[in-house]
Image (tube, grey):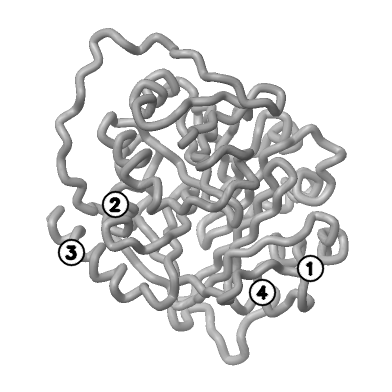
Amino acid sequence: MELHILEHSLKVASIAKEGIQICTHGLIKLAFLPSKTRCKFFSLTETPEDYTIIVDEEGFKELPESEHLSVAEATWLALNVVSGGGSATNSQPIGVTKIAKSVIAPLADHNISVFMLSTYQTDFILVRERDLPMVMHTLSSEFTLLRVVNGETVAANSLGVTNGFVKPKLVPRPIIHPLSSPSNMFCVTSLDPDTLPSVATLLMDVMFYSGGIKEPGASNEDSGHIRFFSFSLIEGYISLVMDEQTTQRFPNNVLFTSASGELWKMVRIGGQPLGFDECGIVAQISEPLATADIPAYYISTFKFDHALVPEENIQSVIGALRTNESAGQ
C-alpha cells in the first residue's frame, strides 16, 4: 500500500462559540466560495464546546485575528493511506480501524501524536511537520512513501533518520480517558459540489445557527443528545457528518448515502480537554475496534475525540472499550 504525504501545511484552531460571528464571513468564503480563495483543505467541526477548524495556510489567511480564536502551535501535515494507487480523495475508504495496526499503533509506539480526520471519502492522519522524519522512518517498512507535489505523487526522499533508532518496546495501551455515548444517531454523507449552491442557505443555518431547530418537547438536558456537525471541503470533495434529524432537513436525493442507509453511533473520548501532546489516544480506541473488525470513522477536535461506529455495533463496542478501560485502572 501507499502512504501519501499531502502537500498542504495545516493549522488546527478552535473558535469559541461566542466568537463565531466574528469568523463567519471567512468561514462562508472557505466553505461555499472556494474559487475566491486558494484554499484546498478546509474542515469545520462543531461540538458542544467550540468549533474546530483544520485549514491550510492559504485558507487560514481568511480568518481574522481574535481573542476567540485559539491556534495550536504546530504546523501539521496530512497523511493518507491509498490501496491500489489513485489519489487520496477518490480512493476506497480505508476506515480508521483498517489502519489501526499498520499506521496508528506504530506511530503511538514511537510517541508520535496524531490528529485524525475521517471523511466520507477517506481518512486523514495529521502529524506535526517536525515529526515527519520519524513518521517516515517508522512507516517505511510497511508502505511505499510518496509525497504530493503540485498535485503529482513523487517518491518521498528519506529525511535522514537512520542512526540511533531504537525499536520501542511495545506495551498495552489501556484506555485512560472517560468514554460517553450520546443518544443521537449520525449519518456520514457527501454531496455533489455542483449542488452546493442549492443548499447553501440551509447549510449556513446548520453550521452557524445550531440553536435553530429542536425536536418537539426536547429540553437542553434532554436524553443525552449533543450538538455535533462536521463539514469538510478537501481538494474539491465534500464530506458531512450530522445527526439523523439534521439530514431530514435536506431535500431528497441531495445527500449521498450508502446502499444500506447506515446510521452511526458516537463514542466520545475525554472528560477534560485532551491537548495535543499526549500520544496513543487514537490507538487506544482503534486497536480494540480493529481486533473486533468493527469499522469506524474517527474525528479529533481541539478538545475531545469522537469515534463513529455502526449503530448495531454500539453495545459490543462499548463493552470492548470498557474492558480496555478497566485494564488501565
Residue that appears at 63% across and 81% down: 214
Residues 82 and 169: in front is 82
Residue 115 visible to an observer of this rendering: yes
Q: In the drawing, what numbered circle is on residue 323?
A: 3
The quarter of the displayed image where residue 291 is located: bottom left
Most extreme residue toward the bottom is 217
Residue 277 spot, x, y in % from top left = 36, 34
Q: Secondary structure at mark 2?
A: helix
Residue that appears at 59% across and 57% down: 120
Check if mark 4's residue and mark 3's residue have beta carbons within 8 Å.
no
Q: Is residue 312 above or below residue 135?
A: below
Mark toward the start of the polypeptide (1 vs 3)? 1
Q: Residues within 10 Å of mark 3 (few under 14, many from 20)?
A: some
Q: In the drawing, what numbered circle is on residue 247?
A: 4
Residue identified by numbered label 2: 287
Q: Secondary structure at mark 3?
A: helix
Residue identified by numbered label 1: 202
- Please state which amino acid type lies under the numbered disc 3: Thr
- Please state which amino acid type lies under the numbered disc 1: Leu
